[in-house]
Amino acid sequence: MNNNKIEKILWPIGVLFFSSIFFFTIKTVPLSVYFMIIDLLLLGLILKYSVRKNRYLFCNILVAAWANMVSYIGIRTVQKNIISWHFYGRNWYVYLLFCGYIGEILWISSVLILKKKCVNIQVESGNDQGFVNDNLKFSPWFIESRKRDLLRLEEYLTFSNVVGVNGAWGTGKTCLLEEFERRHEKEIYLLRVDVLTCNLDEVDLFLLQEMERIFRKERIYPHYSKELRSIMTANSVLKEFLQFLGESGDIKAKVLDSYREDVAKLKKIILIVIEDLDRIQNVEQIKKLLDFTERLSGGQIRIVYEYDSENLAECGLRRSYLEKYIPYVVNLTNISFQDAVRYYMPDKKAYSKYYFLTASVFLGAYAEEVFGFNMEMSIRLDNPSLRKVKHFLQESEEQLQKPEFGTEKKQNTVLAFYFMKHFFPDFYEGLTLFGNCIDEIKFEVPQTKERYSLQELMNQVRKNQEADGKSESGLSEDKVRELFSAPNTQENQCGLILLKLLGYNIQSMDEAYRDRTKMDEGEGKRVNRVYEYHYMRSVEALKHAEKNDKVSALIRNLHANGNQKDTQAEQRAKVFVSEVLEQEDQVAGWKRFKQSEEGVFLMGIDGYVELAKSLRLLLEAEEWKSRAQDIWYRFVVFYNKGQTHQITPEYIAMCNYIDARSCKVFLEIIKNFNEMKIIGRMPEEKMYLNFLKKYSQYAWYVGFLDYYQEWKLDTNGEKDLLLDYLKDIDQRLQLSMTLVPECDHIRADMEVVLRFFRKNQELVKTEKIAEWKDWLQIKINTHSQEEYVDEEMYKKLEKLAESDINQEEFGRYLDQAYVEEKVSLREAKMLNKQFFSRCIPRNTGN
């Protein structure tokens, strides 16, 4: 006897048995209550599930209803409680409930009998539904070159249960499926599986749960889905029992076949889309997923895999292996950059402003005069990532809404800048916040691997011309031509095109450089050359120089605020302050922050530098100024707790963002700096000089230096001049320490500052150059302001300095006020000086 017959016999026996126990235990169940409960249960099932689509379920319900009725009558007869179920003398509602019961039973029975042929649907009978329809229209914004891909996908899904969509990450696989869904939304249920966000060990359970929702939506009871999930669950009792019997695989296959019968009852096809299959790092998990979906597909279930075949091939899954699971593949057609822009911006007026980015550009007449040649160039982005294009458009469009970018030239610069950021990251990451983009984009000579800026290339050509074309002097015109025309010089071409797109004028650059060179190296006295440069330049020369300066200033502004949108940067800083810096358990707060949207940083960018930048933007606002220094102090302490103690370029870049104008913040930073290990000199001298300028200024601002000479840091790369500057500060600090002999805490802080500048001497002397991890520096201008920390305390100490108090006692009062942060170091030095000025005349009088 097979399992189905055994189940049909055991089901009514089981219902009869348990019902009898229930009614025997609960001895008082009035007939009206019984029929009311049964009527409500049957009515609820009829309303929730379709009788026609759930033959198996309602057959069991009918059997259970009759078995339950027999049990109810039998137990009451045995208990000699006939009146409890007898109809004689009953109220009218009892007859109504009974009629409702009979009506529901007859309704279920009639539907099951009359619709028997419709219910017994075979799995493969629903496979005649096709997706090819010439009357369907494409969305007006859909990419023209991808229409054939979509038609091919529709054709494959008409006769195949599994289809692959092959393309690199971000090239539009999801967009293709979205358009397919729009065209066939009345024919399919779409289920997406993102392998990056779901638990790969439970993908099968996730799919079954999602399909259960579809079953219930169409009033189908997911009987076999529950059995299948129970078998697949890791800790399932049923699974362990079947494994014990050795029938787990057979039972699973049979249940899967029965599950397909349930799926065949659906009005629509279930389309399961597995996104980014190639991003699964474990090959065995890929094979397991392919095997399960192959078993599941068929009839009303179709599978579409999105992947990059090159990545799968690197994992060892080549076409010879995949063709069993994915017999048909749609390889995405390459699209142009302009097609991608039109996809997101179908309005011609909106996307026309992006034309110039891929249009032809020329070197121009002036460059032709210097280099001896002119050429036409353009950037071609073959099959760009649609995701990158989307992000590029979102960021650039938001910037263009700002009123300061109202002119066409500024808009072109903005668009070219973000074009470089998203599609040419190597150029973007090479930018700094204290230089000019036109000087920082370099061009490589293939033979020597030397890199030159555009201005340096011009200088090399002139040097060669002055040497009558000798190959060992400078670069000849032919070599420069090769830089931009040889087969492997696409990077040089892109760099030159980007400079033109950004709006730089080559002639203006060269004229400004030659004017500066004339001032620095020309004939005659330097003072005369300086006067000529500053006071005797023509208006045209000033205009030309100003043009490129405006472009550079705009790029620096975009770069300072361009890694994230301003509002996002402020939001990130606010969340970081509230969720981390102001929390008692900062470690737990930091973990929560990193899991939040605000805690996601761009790949390859140092997170702490991004945070320092976001904080600087936030704390400049008027409403945050009163709390700014306290927040900066918390940030510095938090950074010092969790980071490796090395002086890296990223650390110097972060320090350039921090506003350390308070003594507390300044000392905390330099104390940590003093304890750090030197791993090499900074790779960018300008950035390091900017760091020294800032912290020399902060040392003066809080009172450790009486003055500082910023002009001495214009060393032009001469190490000896830089060391002379640091040694000069060293001597002045030692002298200042002799003026406060009785103030131990002041002397201790001055000792910290002295160590800071001596540490910088060690750093400058280091021969090794530290390497970058990221490129992210910023230049921030600060302004000092004279004010008292505690004016009342200052006045008291001022009176005390004028009294007859002795030096030791006055020093003790002054030191105590400094420790309690009631006077700054500058104020302490002024008060100490005032005390000695009162004592000196008295001593001379004696």
Image: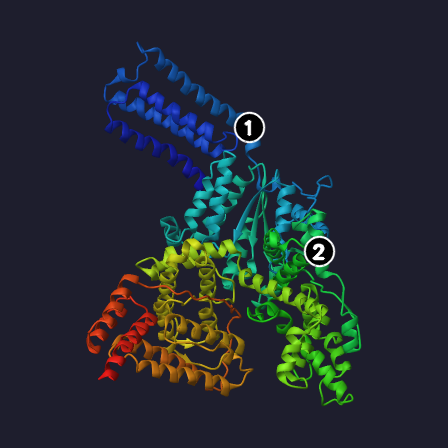
Q: Which mark is residue 663?
A: none
Residue 705, relative to residue 778: is it above or below?
below
Residue closest to the far front: 845
How far is disc 1 from disc 2 in space, using C-alphas? Answer: 57 Å
Quadrant in the picture for residue 11: top left
Q: In the image, what residue type sits under mark 1?
A: Lys
Asked if 605 appears above or below 26 in the picture, the reply is: below
Q: Residues within 10 Å of mark 2 (few under 14, many from 20)?
A: some
Which residue is at a point 37% across and 24% down the rendered structure image? 38
The disc label shown at residue 338, or none: 2
Report the residue at 44% width, 83% height from top. Answer: 726
- Which residue lies at the image location 68% right of the left edge and 86% below the top edge? 523
Q: Position of residue 84 (x, y in %)?
A: 27, 17
Closer to us: 589 or 800: 800
x then y, percent, for residue 397: 62, 52
Tell me the kind of residue under disc 2. Gln
Image colouring: rainbow
User: Residue 10 at what x, y percent from top left?
Assistant: 38, 36
| Quadrant occupied by the N terminus | top left
* Mark 1 touches mark 2? (CB < 8 Å): no
Depth check, mark 1 against mark 2: the one in front is: 2
Closest to the observer: 247 or 48?
48
> Which residue is under mark 1?
115
Q: Quadrant of the C terminus?
A: bottom left
Look at the numbered disc 2 and give the secondary structure of its residue: helix
Is residue 335 in view?
no
Q: Quadrant of residue 578?
A: bottom left
Q: Is residue 227 left or right of residue 474?
A: left
- In the rendered image, residue 673, in percent from the top left (x then y), is placed at 39, 76
